[in-house]
Amino acid sequence: MDFYTQSNDIENRPWNSQHASLRARLVYFEVIKDSWELRVGHDWMTIAQLYPPLSNFPAGSYMGNLAYRLTQIRVTKNFKFSDGDLLKVRLALDKPFNFAKLNSGLVIFDNEPDTDFGYPGVEAKIAYHTKLFDRPTLFALFGHYSGQEYKEDYSTLEGEEKTTSFSTGVEVSLPLPFFKKYSPTLSGEFWYGQGLGGYYTGSVDQTARIKYWDESESKYVYATTLTGFDKNNNKVVSITPVHAVGGWVELRLKLTPKLQSWFGWGIDNPLNSDLKGVSGARLQQRMYYAHFLYRFVPELGAGFEYLRAITDYRESDGDDGIVNRFMMSFCC
């Protein structure tokens, strides 16, 4: 459960319908019958469900780690070939939350552009769970498609501008046959798509390039949010999804019976030409991290983590951004 001290403000209410003062991260109803599963509620997205084991699990967002949580209806069919071989086929209908930052500044008068699109989002995944070298192994393919509809003229609510989002990608968790003493495992994710800002956590949170006419400046403006958009005077001309490619890779080692470590790298790389004319565009974002977890007893452990994040901008927009983060954690 999450407890927020502020969920609304006067100008943009509600600022996020999924961030109430009291919010449950995962709430769903599930029915399991033989090899079938039906899950309805708020859960992890059906696509990319393999996450880097960072202390703050969304920390890899917009740096290669795709997907978050959404309200969805999901059907799963399990094909069990043997005790160690399982194929899971999943299909879900979901409700995207506004692609988040795309409509910044519009939320007060256009809160559900995903509903206006007329169709729910669709997610699919095929995951094969098996064993190699007597250790768990995963190979998975995934993808999604969804859309939103905005108005060209918000003063009259006339005209329609639609934009779509899709992804396709792979996930792998593969034990390595050498240095068996340390149980090495190589994991990672690779994806490609468009319109991946917001809760899809891709494209460095730049869902689309919006072209609109700024009446006060008498010129066209290109942006990835509508924060500076005047609904009474400005007019949307076009919304073009930003394409991006990215992923992450990680090596896990069990250094001692009580000490585990993870070393990883990730990248989120939007297509620069899709961001042409956008002031302050984030052209690429990368992460490097090392995480160590020591378990004093099976029920109690302490961790230390270092993460370095680098954001690339055009020279005309200033220097690249660099963040170094250190974190300690306790787990049980």
Image (cartoon, helix red, strand yellow):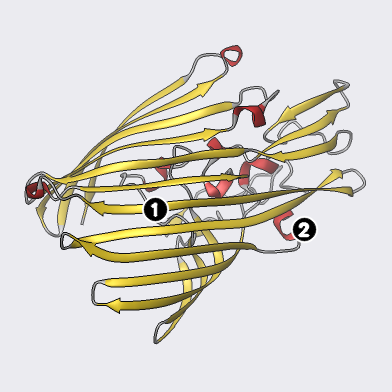
Q: Is residue 218 left or right of residue 209?
A: right
Q: Quadrant of residue 305?
A: top left
Q: Amino acid at mark 1?
A: Glu
Between the C-alphas of marks 1 and 2, the distance is 32 Å
Q: Earlier in the sequence, mark 1 or mark 2?
A: 2
Q: Residue furthest bottom?
A: 34
- Residue 245: assigned label: none
177 or 201, nearer to the observer: 177
Picture coordinates of residue 165, whole percent (x, y): 64, 50
Decide: few, some or many residues near mark 2? Use Cα within 10 Å; few <14, some 14-19, many ≥20: some
Q: Amino acid at mark 2?
A: Asp
Q: Where 106 sits versus 133, above or below?
A: above
> Could you tell me which secondary element the residue under label 1 belongs to?
strand
What residue is shown with label 2?
A: 116
Q: Is residue 307 left or right of residue 106?
A: left
What residue is shown with label 1?
A: 171
Q: Which residue occupies 74% across, 43% down?
A: 106
Does residue 306 appear in the picture of this structure?
yes
Q: Which residue occupies 61% across, 39% down?
A: 243
Picture coordinates of residue 137, whole percent (x, y): 27, 59
Quadrant including the N terminus: bottom left
> Could you tell me which secondary element the residue under label 2 belongs to?
helix
Q: Which residue occupies 15% across, 50% down?
A: 177
Which tag is nearer the camera, tag 1 or tag 2?
Answer: 1
Q: Is residue 108 left or right of residue 319?
A: right
167 or 317, nearer to the observer: 167
Picture coordinates of residue 110, whole percent (x, y): 76, 50
Does residue 6 appear in the picture of this structure?
no
